[in-house]
Image (cartoon, grey):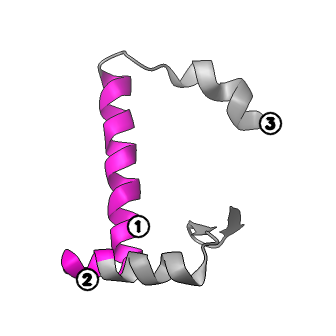
Amino acid sequence: MKTSTNKDKRLEIRISEEDLKLLKIASYFIGQKPSQMVRMFIDSTINGLKIKIKQGEIKIEDFEAILND
């Protein structure tokens, strides 16, 4: 994955043409564009982690060493 810094972080992923076609089909079924579908997945993942952190099930400090590598 590649990130670049502007006002926000950007994320670039590489997938095959066939996988992109399937992503477009899947996003069409839920009425979104592929980028919206990926963003929805990312948002739900982040929100789930925030809930786990708030409940005390996950501590960010435990992952600091991994994130700094």
Q: Mark 1 or 2 closer to N-term? A: 2
Comparing 8 with 56, the one in front is 56
Find the distance from the CA under tag 1 to the CA under tag 2: 13 Å
Residue bearing mark 1: 38
Q: Which mark is residue 28?
A: 2
- Closest to the camera, between mark 1 and mark 2, is 2
Query: Which residue is rendered at x = 20% and y = 78% of the image?
Result: 29
Q: Residue at x 37, y 82 (%)?
A: 24
Q: Position of residue 59 (x, y in %)?
A: 49, 19
Residue under label 3, please give it: 69
Q: Which amino acid type is marked by label 2?
A: Tyr
Q: Is residue 9 above or below residue 23?
A: above
Q: Which residues are magenta?
A: 26-54
Direction from residue 41 to residue 31 in the image, left or right? left
Q: Quadrant of the N terminus?
A: bottom right
In reply to whether residue 52 is colored magenta, the answer given is yes
Please say if 63 is above or below 26.
above
SS category of the residue bearing label 1:
helix
Q: Give the mark nearest the N terminus, 2 or 3.
A: 2
Whichever of labels 1 and 3 marks the residue nearer the N terminus, that label is: 1
Residue 67 higher or lower than 3, as above or below:
above
- Residue type at the position of mark 1: Val
Mark 2 Cα shell of 10 Å, populated few (<14), some (14-19), many (≥20): few
CA neighbours of label 3 inside 10 A, class few (<14), some (14 to 19), many (20+): few
Closer to viewer: mark 1 or mark 3 = 1
Amino acid carrying label 3: it is Asp
Q: Secondary structure at mark 3?
A: loop
Residues at marks 2 and 3, CA–CA distance in whole angstroms? 37 Å
Residue at the (29%, 31%) spot, across then down: 51
